Image (cartoon, rainbow, N blue to C red):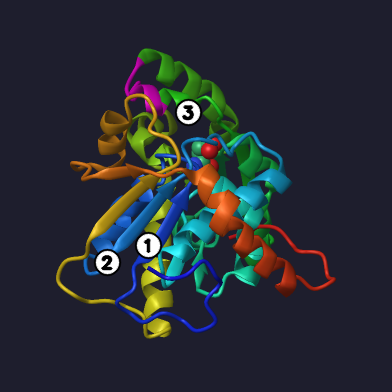
Amino acid sequence: MSPATLPDALPDRAAPVGVFDSGIGGLTVVRQLMRLLPGEDIIYFGDTARIPYGTKSDDTVKRFALEDSFFLLDQGVKAVVVACNTASAIAIQVLRRFLPVPVVGVIEPGVQGALRETRNGRVGVIGTATTIRSGAYRRLLLAARPDLQVVSQPCPLFVPLVEEGWIEDEATYLIARRYLQPLLENRVDTVILGCTHYPLLRPVLGKVLGPGVRLVDSGVEAAHHLKQVLAEAGLLNTRRRGEHRFYLSDFPYKFQEIGERFLERTLPHVETVNFEAFLLNKGRRFWAQLEKRWHSAPVPGGDG
Ligand code: DGL
């Protein structure tokens, strides 16, 4: 195991890929990574003790995202995947500035997916309140194509509905119809699923939006992007079968059941870490090093 310091040199290709999320939802991204990059070892950290991120302030999300990454760096990862849309939207630039390994978020790949899919130039974006408030998806979509019409809609109730397992429930349809009304009125032909939990709602979203609307899963797009980033950095591991380790900062109620729904397979051993103790000990050393790297310029926020 590596020491609690920010490494200066890139680890080799045999090192694991680190993935973090505010909780369990990031397993939808892990599912895609396992599918596309079966040779990679994956270390997942879900900050289940501090979820949700989707309602928190920008400063808190940035701090949490850095701390989650410290945990992964301490495990010797060669790249960090920010599975959480909220953390990607708010903190990707801070992470890219301070982490010594490649950082892949879900926003930029999701935007690329939508640009590829849309025919009529009307794109819907759904996500947590913080993701939508950040304007990250909208900004990147318009930067690439200023003629696009972007319709953004926060859908905060989708997260608890998915965790409750109410996927094709009457209540979920009712709420989906209400949230998606502005997207329907504006006749979007493409919708970015800008939250870890939303891929599970595909059946409902597909029915409410209609067959003509393409759904872009930012996790799928991020997996492809990671593959490209690793290949370009000479870090791709094409071994036959990778190993996967799962860490959580708390073991929540019904975790196994919910986690397996997200991962679409049996969850192997999951370890609960004493994250508070980690932050008080090793975390402090990471923060001290990071402060040394901190130059006077203010740190920008998200968009990735
Ligand atoms: N993982 C978060 C996201 O993708 C959803 C859950 C939360 O609010 O923390 O935005």
What quarter of the picture does the N terminus occupy? bottom left
Q: Residues within 10 Å of mark 3 (few under 14, many from 20)?
A: many
Place of residue 165 in the rendered image (x, y in percent of width and height, measured from the top left): 33, 23
169 is higher (above) or lower (below) than 52? above
Instruction: Decide: is 50 above or below 59.
Output: above
The amino acid on which the numbered mark 2 sits, given as a three-letter code, is Leu
Element under label 3? helix
Relative to 279, is 289 above or below? below
Query: What percent of the width, then of the height, locates residue 261?
Result: 27, 35
Residue under numbered circle 3: 158
The residue mark sitting in front, 2 or 3, is 2
Neighbourhood count class around disc 1 (C-alpha, 10 Å): few under 14, some 14–19, many 20 upward: many
First of labels 2, 3 by sequence position: 2
Q: Are marks 2 and 3 in contact (CB under 8 Å)?
A: no
Residue 168 inside the magenta-drawn segment: yes
CA distance for labels 3 and 1: 23 Å
**SS class, disc 2:** loop
Which residue is pictured at 21% across the width and 45% down the height?
268
- C-alpha span from label 2 to label 3: 29 Å
- The secondary structure that dominates the magenta segment is loop
Which residue is denoted by mark 1 in the rendering? 223
Which labelled disc corresponds to residue 37? 2
Where disc 1 sits, the SS reads: helix
Q: Residue at 65%, 51% (x, y): give it.
A: 63
Residue 123 visible within the image: no
Residue farthest left in this picture: 240
Q: Quadrant of the C terminus?
A: bottom right
